[in-house]
Amino acid sequence: MSFAGRKRGRFERNCACSGIDIHCHVVPSSFPSTPGGRAIKGWPSMSPVVDCHATVVIDDKPYRTIGDACWVAERRIEEMDKAGIQIQALSPMPELFGYWIEAEAADGLNRHVNDVIAAMVEQGRGRFVGLGGVPLQDIDLAIRELQRIMAQPGFHGVEIGSNINGVAIGDPRFHPFFAEAEKLGAAIFVHAVRPAGMDRLVGPAPLQQVLAYPTDVGLAAASVITGNLLKHFPNLRIAFSHGGGTLASLLPRLEQGYATFPALTDALFEPPSVQAKRLYADTLVFDTETLRRVISVFGEDKVMIGTDYPFNFREKDPLACVDAALADQAGRERLTFANALTFLAIEEVSNA
């Protein structure tokens, strides 16, 4: 039985605060010990909370210092109200996917993070929905965890990495997972993780987020197109963070290649530009003209607010960005909430 067409929640618009942010992360305030207490490379831990801040530690090295908005629902809601955001879609900090650790241990880590998300959804009283994580290095375990969370109220899909240990998400080995996601009606949000090209960057570590993330997301989106993923799973709802990354720049070349090389023409079930309009993307590009280009590539009905809240490198005034990019009110309403309702399978109800 397919659940792809079913709505998973209801939305009553608050006129003062109606945006839906599909790109928001959660970090638990603590992590369990490793299975059996043994050392597992890549397993996270958390330093004690001091003045509402703590540091995620991985392999005995500080990974990121974060604020308690990562795990305190009330703190998030205060800032959502200020930004005009009514609903956040909560997803794991990507380093918590654990694709690079043994599958059974990663399964336990994802389950822990998903249970934290579930608790925050409940605490949020309608202000949050969940996009969980799954251990995609093991397809069977990933499907099992997908089924578990999609059976829980409040979960609307999953967040996955732009690559799984270097394998593009358009690779056919992931088809069984996407088949189950389509069957369950689960939204898929793609976020950069451990991106390619780090050896080509010259400068400090934050360039991974600044430059390598959108590059890897663009390649992930391109792999979905060249791998004909939506030919196999036409009802799959899949969105890409960071405005689809570099896809907006790659797409004209891909389109020209489709028209030039018979092998590419024969390989794709639809032109790349047509396939791109079946995908979703967020608004997190930090530039009005770039956002307009993203809207042109994906379509006005496929772009949604994304902020990367609550991290420092984020969009702090997302509604203003949409207002600057679009002149017409109908288009603004699509980007601020209507498109996200469709992506997340939420039904809007009248407050009359």
Image (cartoon, grey):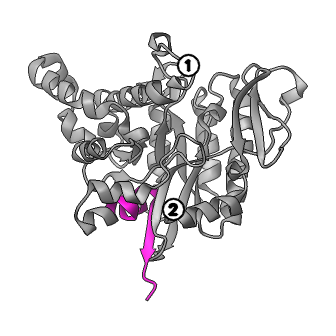
Give the residue type that dot 2 points to: Ala
What kind of element bears circle 1? loop
Labels 2 and 1 touching (C-beta < 8 A): no
**Residue 343 belongs to the span the image colors magenta:** yes
- Position of residue 115 in the picture relative to residue 206 (left or right): right
Q: Which label is found at residue 204?
A: 1
Residue 351 placement (x, y as % from top left): 46, 84
Q: Which residues are magenta?
A: 334-352
- Position of residue 29 in the picture relative to residue 146 (left or right): right
Q: Residues within 10 Å of mark 1 (few under 14, many from 20)?
A: few
Dividing the picture into quadrants, the one containing residue 72 is: bottom right
Q: State the separation of the CA atoms marked 2 and 1.
A: 31 Å
Q: Earlier in the sequence, mark 2 or mark 1?
A: 2
Q: Is residue 201 above or below residue 226?
A: above
Residue 128 placement (x, y as % from top left): 59, 61
Q: Please name the residue shown 32% across and 39% down the image.
A: 230
What kind of element bears circle 2? helix
Residue 292 placement (x, y as % from top left): 25, 47
Q: Please name the residue shown 26% across and 68% down the image.
A: 330
